[in-house]
Image: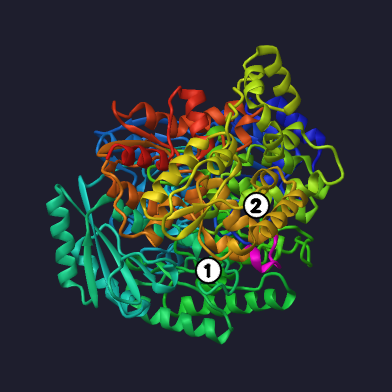
Amino acid sequence: MPDPHPHPDLVRALARAVRGDVEADATARALTTMDASNYRRVPVAVVAPRDAGDVAETLRVCREHEVPVVPRGGGTSIAGQATGTGVVLDFTRHMRRITGLDPDSRTAVVEPGVVLDDLRAAAAAHGLTFGPDPSTHSRCTLGGMIGNNSCGAHSVAWGTTADNVRSLRVLRYGGGPSLHLGRGLPDTPPGLGDFAGAHLALLRTGFPELPRRISGYALDALLPENGPDHARSLCGSEGTLAVVTEATVRLVATPAARALAVLGYADESAAAEAAPGLLPHGPLTVEGMAADLVREPAGLPRGGAWLFVETGGATPAEARAHAERIVRAADALDGTVVTDPSRMRTLWRIREDAAGTATRMPDGGGEAWPGWEDCAVPPARLGPYLRDFRALLAEHGLRGTPYGHFGDGCIHVRIDFDLLTAPGVARFRRFSEDQAGLVVAHGGSLSGEHGDGQARAELLPRMYGDEMVGLFTRFKDLWDPDGGLNPGILARPARLDENLRFAVLPGRPVDVTFGYPQDGGDFSAAVRRCVGVAKCRTAGAITGPDVMCPSFRATGEEAHSTRGRARLLHEMLAGEVITDGWRSTEVRDALDLCLSCKGCRTDCPVGVDMATYKAEFLHHHYRGRLRPASHYAMGGLPRWLRAASPFARGLNALARTGPVAALVKRLGGIAPQRTLPVLAPRTFRAWARARRAPVGGPAVTLWPDTFTDHLSPEVGRAAVRVLEAAGRTPVLPGRGVCCGLTYVSTGRLDAARAVMRRTLDRMGPLIGGPVVVLEPSCAATLHTDLPELLPDDPRAAGLASSVRTLAQYLEEYAPDWQPPRLDRPVAGQTHCHQHAVLGDAAERRLRERAGLTGELSGGCCGLAGNFGFEKGHWDVSVACAEDRLLPSVRAATPGTELLADGFSCRTQLDQLAGRRARHLAEVLAEGLDGR
């Protein structure tokens, strides 16, 4: 079928026929041009059906208009099968219901948009789970898992998705009634009943025997001795045969307790060769990875590669004993058993984030991409295969970081292909052809988990031969004679070097303001960081310090996820769907609800920094144009507060007068629901100038940020008390120093750089010594934005490297100082900027030494500087606070100390919960006064 172009008749017909959402605007189309692969295809429209009736109507209308249809779940497919030129069916908005869960039969009935973690959470109440668990379990859908025949880490115990599907209800592009498919069920498309019988010999001999054979169509499921099982034959068909509207899936008993044996080996080949010998011990997982995937110290056993072998048991002691037996039986250099749940989560996070972290070479040497992400060989052949694979990479001058499901012989790897130039793409093709030959020589499958898609389907004849691939095409035609479902995938595939998503990007670096040091100064490279694994789309419960992505968690909309915004920026640079560049209203509207929390800078596996991209975009978007009132009011906050300071008492009185406050908020673009902050009658600087400081020890620069100086000087006074108690002499720099935070967050980057240069001039000789910054957002700005906006000024890098939080400074420069014992529980929130940029390890240790017990919540408070004060952001701001911060505060027991080092966090708690939180410095200072 021809690739169609947007047509108003189609969209009108869909809107009349479908009760769900029909979108053909630039934003909707731009958000679905890509999945998590190297490929890009521009759709005509996106339909989010409400039920199977909507799906049937969409197929009817598209058939009448000769427009293809692409079913799509979470969009995390790595081979390109979730992209298409027709109408995209987005099941994640409405068709995400669990319509039945029977613990007795251990089955669940789900719609295709159900997120795997939601099913697992529902099943967990009955001691059950869905066995397959890809690393994207927090956002991938059951429909997508069926389409790809997904597996995950626990497949050695519970098999692939196909092993866990009981029956499917599907609709065909050509129309007709819904078919109910499964072992022993009579429904089949016309002509399919005789298909297997006519080709028994080929179907019995043409498929390799290995646990992770995902490539091609599963025609062997049609053999009489295998059922036939038409539901199983549809698993892994990548949306090319029929559209799943309901699935009945098997659930398995989950162990009451788990333990993790971590085994160290000399290298990945040694680990791979050891993996099959562990399978007789009945592990739940046998996962492998090498040292070049571990970017930070993780407390792993001695070795250059590791196996993660999870065990289960009825009790913690039984699970641990099982793991200890495996450690004793393994021929490993070193090994340990981990039973602490938080420690296990930390280790599993390293493994689960690999799909993202592997996209950057460990030595900073460049980008790496999927394409040969998940080949599989018989587990006994994995060691020799990996050695040959490494040799093939070297032969082509390529590098990659293998990891994956060693127990099943399935390897994931991102490779540093050059997909930007014609010679690089040609090498990508040559390597792909050679790699296909290598996998087949080892008796393997081109795909062991993520499907063939566009990345490998062209090479299926090398694995199966022309006769079997011919059967694949006939099978496709029996199901979909019009060729309307996901054309170009699996049967009659597009070439593996067509439709590459990088081809549309500018060939030269874009003129930008930030330095983008991690991306060679190239804004396109920064945007390319997003590979689509969509960790930012996690909507379920989160434990731990993670922040990303608060706006998606509040709205549930792709456009307000980090991935969605990155996709829109990609399409802005491409200029095909979004055509007005930096003036794009589509990008502006998507970025409007970005809180600039910087959570993605750390939590995104590839380090997308949407806060920086937003500031860059706003800088260009409003250049030479009138800005929103809030950009002037809150973007210029330091200047306004300095001017207002002498009149603080009178202005505070006026701000409490209803009509005056309403006028100020209307003129300043401030949300009417907000209460204006109270100005300090006496600034922190004024207090510091007036007091007679004791003669003390070594001097330390204490940064007088705008918020501490004018809005919460009690924090500064407390910090002075603590530093002096630690034997230090706080010194404030001269007037006029400012980090430029508010100018950066509103995209006024010319003003930000001017402020930063003036600050560097006035800091003078103080640059080089430690600088204690009490406000986390200001510390983060000095640490990251300052050197990235002034990359050519060595003073910027010097000041950035000097920034310390109070806890970091005390730990580094006054390690023997003993804080007061406070002995009380704490609640509150770690500032999102501190989590993302500075880390809070020193704060945790200081709290522990002071007897402050308990954990602070992650997430973002929702105020986030100017964001929560801006008109139009109130609902999202409150939703972000209600996600984690406010529930944790409400759950706190009486006498719990509420901690929040950020002014925004304290303000949000005050205005939404009526609770006063304090900076850690205030709590410590109070303890000192009580000694």
Region rendered in magenta: 790-796
**Residue occupying image coordinates x 40% and y 50%:** 724
Q: Nearer the viewer, residue 210 or 528?
A: 528
Mark nearer the viewer, 2 or 1: 2
The answer to which image quadrant residue 269 occupies is bottom left
Asked whether the viewer can see residue 656, the reply is yes
Q: Nearer the viewer, residue 437 or 781?
A: 781
Quadrant position of the C terminus in the picture? top left
| In this view, 872 is above or below 738 | above
Question: Residue 414 has which mark?
Answer: 1
Question: Marks 2 and 1, how far apart in space?
Answer: 26 Å
Kind of residue at disc 1: Arg
Asked whether the viewer can see residue 228, the reply is no
Q: Nearer the viewer, residue 212 or 65?
A: 212
Residue 708 forms part of the magenta stretch: no
Badge 1 element: loop
Residue 525 placed where, x, y %?
67, 63
Outermost right residue: 624
Q: Which residue is mark 2?
A: 612
**Residue occupying image coordinates x 67% and y 70%:** 419
